[in-house]
Image (cartoon, rainbow, N blue to C red):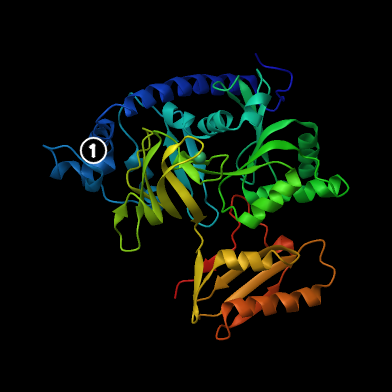
C-alpha cells in the first residue's frame, strides 16, 4: 500500500519501473545469499569471472585453463582500471543483466561507471536500510506500510529529486534530495524536512552540516529537523564531528561504508564496536604498505564484490585506509570488522620529533570555535592550517593566536606552520566532491 506521504516528485511510470527492479532485486539477492552460503561458492564465482569477464579472461584464463582459481591468481586492480576500461569488467553472462548504471565522481577525477545486476542493485541502498532496520529498534518501530523510510541528502549535480520505493521494507520510500542547488531550493528543502517524521536521514557529514546551518537560519537558531537515526557515509566521519551532529540532531549518528564499487559493504552496530562487514557482500582484505594482502591489519582495503555480478570487481583496491579485524561483538555479530576508517586521509603526520596523530590535532581544534579546518603537510615539509571560525567566535584575533600556539606546541618547535584564515564558504565542496581535513602532499 502506498500512503499519501509519497510525494509527487517521481513520474508514475518511473515509480513502477523502480518498484519492479526492487522486487526482482530483493528476490535475486536472497537467492544469491543462499548460493554464496554454499561450500565452494567463492571458487565458482572466480571461475565464472575468468570465463565471462573479458578482463579476467585475458589476464587469468590463458595461464590457468585446466585448474580452478583462487583470489591470489587475480591481480589487484584499482580505480584507474575502471576509469579507462570499465567495459572490460562487465560480465557477458546473459543470466545477470544490467538493471542500473551507477555513475559517480567526476569532480576531481574522471567519472566512474559501475553497472549493477538485480542482486547488486539490492545490495546497495536497500540492503543498508534493511541492515539498519534489523539492528536499530527505534527505526524499526517507525516503519509502516508505504510511509517514509529515509531522506537521502546529497550534493551531486546530476541526481534528480525523486522518491524510491523499497519493496523489502513495507514498501516504504526514500526521498532523494539535493542540497546546494540554490538558496531558494535549500530553504524549500529545509521546510520539507522540518515537516517530516524521518526514521533515517542519510548523507555525507558535510551535507549534514549544511542542513544544520540552514535549519538554524530558518528555525531561529534551533535545528528543527528531527531524524531518529543519522546514517553517515561517503566521507570520513571524525569523532568530534559525530558528537556535534548528535547534539544538533538529538539522535544517534552511525557510520556506514557504501560506494558505487562496493555497494553497501559495512555498517556500524549500535554498540560502536566498528563497522561490521555485511554477510555475503564481499571478501575483504588489507593491503599492507609492502603490498602483501592480509586477512587482518592496517592498510588499504581491498574488496572482491560478491554481490554484484554484472561489473565484476576482484581484488579491487578501494584507496581507503582501514584497520581490519575479525571480532565477536556484543551485538551478536562475528566476522570481519573495520575498526578504524580514516579513508583517504592520513592518520598521523610525521614530524622531526615523532608522529602526531590527526585525532590529537582534531582534539586540539575542537577546543576552539572552529567551523572547519584543513591541515596539509606540503611537499616542502611545512604545514598549512586553513580554518574558518564558527558563528560563536567573538574574538577572532585572540582565537587565532591561541590556536596557533596550541598547534605549534603539538607539532614541535622544528616544524614550520602557516596559518590561513578563510571563510566557511571557501571550504564548501564543489558539487559531488568530498570534504576533507588532513592531507600529505607527495614529496
Ligand atoms: Zn556489533
Q: Is residue 147 left or right of residue 321?
A: right
Q: Residue at x 27, y 36 (%)?
A: 49
Q: Is residue 75 left or right of residue 33?
A: left
Asked if residue 258 can be seen in this view, the reply is yes
Looking at the picture, tell me which residue is in the foreground, 2 or 181.
Answer: 2
Q: Position of residue 292 (x, y in %)?
A: 29, 57
Q: Residue furthest front?
A: 330
Q: Residue at x 85, y 68 (%)?
A: 394
**Residue assigned mark 1:** 50
Quick one: quadrant of the C terminus? bottom left
Residue 290: quarter of image:
bottom left
Q: Position of residue 142 (x, y in %)?
A: 68, 25
Asked if residue 180 can be seen in this view, the reply is no
Residue 228: quarter of image:
top right
Element on which disc 1 rests:
helix
Q: Residue furthest top?
A: 1
Q: Residue at x 35, y 63 (%)?
A: 289
Q: Residue furthest left?
A: 66
Above-or-below relation of 8 to 285: above
Looking at the picture, tell me which residue is in the foreground, 15 or 259.
Answer: 259
Q: Position of residue 46 (x, y in %)?
A: 26, 37
Q: Position of residue 256 (x, y in %)?
A: 54, 43
Q: How many marks?
A: 1
Tell me if mark 1 has few (under 14), some (14-19) or many (20+) residues whose alpha carbon lies within 10 angstroms of its own.
many
Amino acid at each position: 500500500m502506498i500512503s499519501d506521504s509519497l510525494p509527487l516528485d517521481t513520474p508514475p511510470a518511473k515509480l513502477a519501473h523502480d518498484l519492479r527492479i526492487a522486487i526482482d532485486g530483493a528476490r535475486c539477492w536472497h537467492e544469491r545469499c543462499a548460493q554464496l552460503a554454499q561450500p565452494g561458492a567463492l571458487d565458482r564465482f572466480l571461475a565464472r569471472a575468468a570465463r565471462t569477464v573479458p578482463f579476467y579472461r585475458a589476464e587469468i584464463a590463458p595461464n590457468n585453463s585446466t585448474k580452478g582459481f583462487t583470489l591470489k591468481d587475480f591481480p589487484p586492480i584499482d580505480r584507474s582500471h575502471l576509469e579507462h576500461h570499465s567495459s572490460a569488467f562487465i560480465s557477458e553472462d546473459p543470466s545477470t543483466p544490467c538493471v542500473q548504471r551507477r555513475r559517480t565522481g567526476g569532480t576531481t577525477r574522471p567519472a566512474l561507471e559501475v553497472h549493477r545486476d538485480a542482486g547488486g542493485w539490492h545490495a546497495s541502498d536497500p540492503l543498508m536500510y534493511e541492515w539498519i532496520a534489523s539492528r536499530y529498534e527505534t527505526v524499526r518501530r517507525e516503519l509502516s506500510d508505504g510511509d517514509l523510510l529515509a531522506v537521502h541528502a546529497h550534493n551531486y549535480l546530476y541526481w534528480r529529486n525523486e522518491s524510491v520505493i523499497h519493496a523489502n521494507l513495507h514498501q516504504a520510500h526514500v526521498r532523494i534530495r539535493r542540497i546546494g542547488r540554490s538558496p531558494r531550493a535549500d530553504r524549500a528543502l529545509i521546510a520539507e524536512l522540518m515537516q517530516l517524521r524521518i526514521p533515517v536521514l542519510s548523507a555525507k557529514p558535510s551535507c549534514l552540516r549544511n542542513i544544520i546551518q540552514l535549519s538554524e537560519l530558518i528555525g531561529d537558531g534551533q535545528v528543527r529537523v528531527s531524524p531518529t537515526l543519522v546514517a553517515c557515509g561517503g566521507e570520513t566521519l571524525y569523532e568530534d564531528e559525530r558528537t556535534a551532529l548528535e547534539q544538533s540532531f538529538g539522535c544517534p549518528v552511525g557510520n556506514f561504508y557504501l560506494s558505487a564499487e562496493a555497494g553497501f559493504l559495512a555498517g556500524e552496530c549500535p554498540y560502536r564496536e566498528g563497522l561490521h562487514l555485511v554477510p555475503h557482500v564481499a571478501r575483504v582484505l588489507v593491503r599492507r604498505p609492502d603490498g602483501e594482502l592480509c586477512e587482518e591489519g592496517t592498510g588499504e582495503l581491498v574488496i572482491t564484490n560478491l554481490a554484484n555480478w554484472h561489473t565484476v570487481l576482484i581484488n579491487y583496491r578501494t584507496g581507503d585506509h582501514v584497520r581490519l579485524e575479525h571480532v565477536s561483538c556484543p551485538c551478536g555479530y562475528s566476522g570481519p570488522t573495520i575498526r578504524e576508517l580514516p579513508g583517504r586521509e592520513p592518520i598521523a603526520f610525521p614530524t622531526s620529533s615523532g608522529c602526531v596523530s590527526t585525532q590529537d590535532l582534531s582534539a586540539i581544534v575542537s577546543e576552539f570555535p572552529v567551523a572547519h579546518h584543513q591541515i596539509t603537510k606540503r611537499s616542502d615539509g611545512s604545514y598549512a592550517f586553513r580554518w574558518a571560525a564558527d558563528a560563536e567566535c567573538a574574538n577572532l584575533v585572540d582565537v587565532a593566536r591561541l590556536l596557533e600556539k596550541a598547534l605549534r606546541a603539538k607539532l614541535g618547535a622544528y616544524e614550520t606552520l602557516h596559518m590561513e584564515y578563510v571563510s566557511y564558504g571557501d571550504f564548501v565542496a564543489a558539487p559531488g566532491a568530498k570534504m576533507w581535513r588532513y592531507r600529505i602532499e607527495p614529496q
